[in-house]
Image (tube, grey):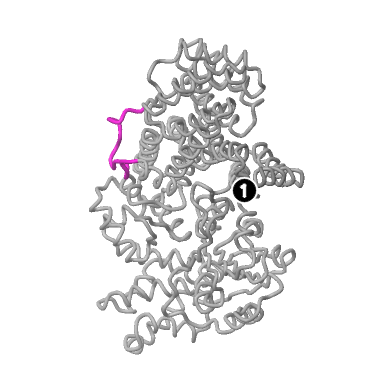
Amino acid sequence: MTGVPEFVVPRQLPLAVRDFTGRADHVAALDALLSGNGPDSVSDAVVISALDGAAGIGKTSLAVHWAHLVQDRFPDGTLHVNLRGYGPGDPAGPGEVLDGFLLALGTPPGDLPQGIEAQAGLYRSLLARRRILIVLDNANSADQVRPLLPASPGCMAIVTSRDSLTGLVVTESATRITLDLLSFGEALQLVTGIIGAERAAAEPVAVAELIRLCARLPLALRIAASRVGADGRTTVTDVVSELLDDRDRIDALSTAGDDRAAVRAVFDSSYQRLTAEQASLFRRLGLHPGPDLSLHAAMALGGLDVRNARRLLGGLASAHLLEPSAGNRYRFHDLLRAYALEQATVVDSAEDRDDALKALLDWYVHTAHACDVVLFSGHLRLLSPAAMPVPKPPFDDQGGAMAWIEAERFNCLAALRHAATNGLHQVVISLAEGLRFLLLLGRHDEWLESGLAGLDSARKTGDDAAEIRLLLITSEAFTLLNRWVEALPDLERAMALSIELGDEYNQASVLNGVGLTHNEREDFDKAVTSFSEALRMIPKGVRMEGVIEGNLGLAYAGLRQYRLAFAHCERGLALRRRVGDLTGEVGAMNAFAKLLQDIGDHGKAIEMCRTAIARARAIRAPLSIAHPSYTLATSLHETGKVREAIECWTEAAVLFARYGNEQRAAQARERIKEATSPAASSARSAIDSTSRYS
């Protein structure tokens, strides 16, 4: 059993800046902070450095440069994240960042905790007694950073921000290091390093003018000089002339302290060298609401095929207007994202922008529903595969679908939030219905968020049929979050609407939800009545029929009518298998194992649980692991395999706690406590003695 993730050594630093220039005093200040953190000694406190300064001043370059210099002094790894603190779109939330760090530290994707407190707890546990360097880039506040700070001596965090982060200095004893503009000498050295000494010597006046126009701002200098260095036909004078031609650019580059304007002007000079196709895609990419984007998302935004999308994205990356990352994914620097969106607003009509966004949102909607088809086979759905737009989903099996949802989860949620903010109600409804895959990741809070957003849109549009479906989603999410009382009003409203519309399928779904509340209250007679009525109404051969059969079996088990319980659970399991409902099959096997326990057949129960756990691991469904692990532990304990039982209860407790089911986690911990108590040990010793001498 695997209750704790295997620790790996992450090395997440971006590429070091080859021609990093200057900042000797700042490098020395960072070195001084590390004096107690070397390989032969461990600091008695966490070291936190806050690098602050204006946009484009070189905070990231310094942090990454220095981190590369010292990362060998952190043998357990280096973590890095861009917190997206400034720019359009939402900053990176602590949950998103902690998910990424936990994955980097070896936590399986399906085992990621739910909730900031649980995420931060596991994160700090994994950092304990290790020496790790954490680079938290582009923060917008101390609050954004605090959950990401280590708590263990030997670790160091570098935080970069446009904000002074005084809160970290006061409450976390962070050392503040402020960056200012480069000196003229440092700026000259930077430009010369990029374009070459020979070309710099050939145009000394132009080089000096370039430095002046770029306000000695490192990012502006680097982009402008790179235009010269990348093309032997372009002179420094050419670039300077282009900067002088546009009054807005001149004003931006010469306004003291307006560093963002300086960067925008330099982006202009790079942007105007793009081909028409590249520029069009660049602008459209700025419309994307999520933290990064895939090749396929770019295809949807640009209306492109694979070949042209790769070509244009490669051109943008070569021009340093887009940053490529692993897995055919791309992202913008914050300022570049703002610039691309600004250009889209200026150049493209509102109709063109709306069409591009519609294509992107449609792609997320239909691809999410394609995931639903693969991962929840047999589930009744509304979207037809014939309606699938180009590009087609980048997967054709369950493994590919799981990889897609792990990569696109945040983008799907960002798309839904964007649609909700902009009143795109049909998109919100459709996307909310397509995010059922959040259940496989244990993200019940996000499932509830999406359902509530969809429900709001359904009500605003007066779509009663959609409202029923969304009420079923919210009631299910409330149930999974152990908020049963809040689920009941949604079930009542859904039933009233279903009766009004004559919708027997959803009436059956509501009755199933009502039956679950009766089961939870151990009112099994009423549960049997609800499930039996639901089973009578549900169409044959759909996934929900198997769900109801299994739930009816459990209700009969509560009444100790085991013949009927086994019959219904067997039918439920068979139906789940028939429609290819893999997660449902795991749940049905766990239910069947519990029935076997009830009649004392622990051998078969153990066999059934082991099979269920293996299936759950294969499909990376963490909560589907937790339930049969708990059930398996019970049978193992009953058959004298106490040590293995404790391992299973431990894994179940960890998983239940991570995904918000504290009640079940507490039950598992209580069973561990009972199994390890002195009385239990004495009883086992007595049994061992009897066995030994009998």
Q: Mark 1 sits on what residue?
A: 643
* Quarter of the image with the C terminus in it: top right
Q: Is the magenta stretch mostly helix, strand or loop?
A: loop
Q: Quadrant of residue 554?
A: top right
Residue displayed at 37% across by 55% down = 329
Residue displayed at 37% across by 19% down = 541
Residue 210 or 197: which is nearer the viewer?
197
| Residue 437 against residue 328 in the figure, above or below | above
Where does residue 502 sit, x and y in percent of width and height? 46, 10
Q: Quadrant of residue 361?
A: top left
Where does residue 193 sit, x and y in percent of width and height? 39, 83
| Left or right side of 678 for 358 | left
Whether the magenta-drawn stretch holds residue 393 is answered as: yes
Question: Which region of the structure is painted magenta?
Answer: 383-397
| Residue 526 against residue 338 in the figure, above or below | above
Q: Can residue 24 be seen in this view?
A: yes
Q: Quadrant of residue 674?
A: top right
